[in-house]
Amino acid sequence: MFDVAIIGAGPVGLLLGSLLLDLGCSVVILEARRDPPSHSRAIGIHPPALAVLRRAGVLEAVLQQSVQISNGKAFSRGRMLGELSFDIPGAPYPFVVSIPQFCTQSILESAFMQRSGGVLLRGHRVTRLTRYGEHIVLGCAQEDTTGGPRDIAARFVVGADGPHGMTRGAAHAHTLQRDYPDSYVMGDFKDGSGLGNLASIFLEDGGVVESFPLPKNQRRWVAHWGRTHAPRTAEGLAEVIFSRTGYSVDVSSSTMLSSFRPRCRIVRHTVGDRVVLVGDAAHEISPMGGQGMNLGWLDAEVMSEGIAHFLETGEKDALMRAGSGRVVAAQRAARLAGFNMRLGRPVGWVRGTVRNTVIGVLARGALRDSAARLFSMQG
């Protein structure tokens, strides 16, 4: 029997596994997919999450494979509205890191497997949870031709299997839901912009375009898809980028293209009967602002301590307080993501002028450091 079974070998589940092993727990991670993902997906790592990665012993490896973003600039109608620096007085890390998720995930998986007491089982899709007193039996369907159903017992279960996983339902978690009217298209291209390591936001009347550097001379572009009639292709995204910003991208260099409609799903309680939800299983928020993966890692840091304490003492109060705190953090992050989306929606001339004035104020004077802290999850 394991102390903890984690369902989901994404970046949050893998980090949590390492933190729990360091606290003396035996851990099994169960992942339905047989192969690790190769999609770039989430790319931004904020300073608070960098501190957690350092605790897990993987920060140096992440920094070696990433780009460090020290500044962000906002533009509109051909002029710069303001600039934010993440080199904030007292901040342990004066930058935001950009690295494709599959690279981060590979680093975290290696770190987990190098620790003793950890087991990673791919091709194991959890289909049921059955409680027996002080432990839970997980029924798994093995996704290959050699193995049949398999039962695995654990004293505690963590759901890190995303918003569509089975753990949220098994935990009987009531969810607060909200759908947004926005849609976006994002793509990764060879970087010919000349923007270097600058994060750039173009708040244009037709909708926002965001641009972030990636390692190996790549760049991500994200565009609001509110009023455009361009097809959701690399060519269509390039057309929108050029029409709104004046920057050209090399369509032939596209390595990733994805469209999405953001939504908000936050559970009221992350802690159940020997079951905890973390990451997207607990809170799915809009990707605009890049908080989701970071939020999950901060879940892992806090909940690992609570889980280890519960397994050692049987006391649940600290775990419940930690879970309540993570719900509040998710709600705060969702509000910021909603604010980011409102700023980036298509607007008329008058509303756009008001918006640009507000952005200019936030990026100047005494509010500048406060805004930088807020958008880098340090506030």
Image: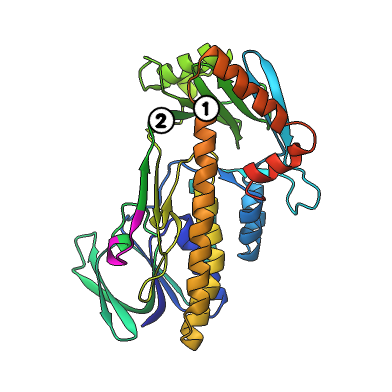
Residue at 62%, 61% in the rendered image: 52
Residue 2 vs residue 129, the one in the foreground: 129
The quarter of the image holding the N terminus is bottom left
Disc 1 to disc 2, C-alpha distance: 10 Å
Residue 233 spot, x, y in % from top left: 38, 22
Q: Is residue 104 visible?
A: no
Query: Which residue bears the numbered disc 1?
Result: 344
Q: What kind of residue is marked 1? A: Gly
Residues at marks 1 and 2 touching, judged by CB atoms closer than 8 Å: yes
Residue at 51%, 11% in the rendered image: 243
Query: Which residue bears the numbered disc 2?
Result: 182
Q: Residue 82 lies in what quarter of the image?
A: top right
Residue at 42%, 75% in the rendered image: 4
Residue 266 spot, x, y in % from top left: 41, 53
Residue 108 spot, x, y in % from top left: 53, 59
Q: Is residue 367 left or right of residue 309?
A: right
Q: Is residue 71 visible?
A: yes
Residue at 76%, 52% in the rendered image: 91
User: Which structural element holds mark 1?
Assistant: helix
Q: Which residues are magenta?
A: 169-175
Numbered circle sitting on residue 140: none
Q: What kind of residue is marked 2? A: Asp
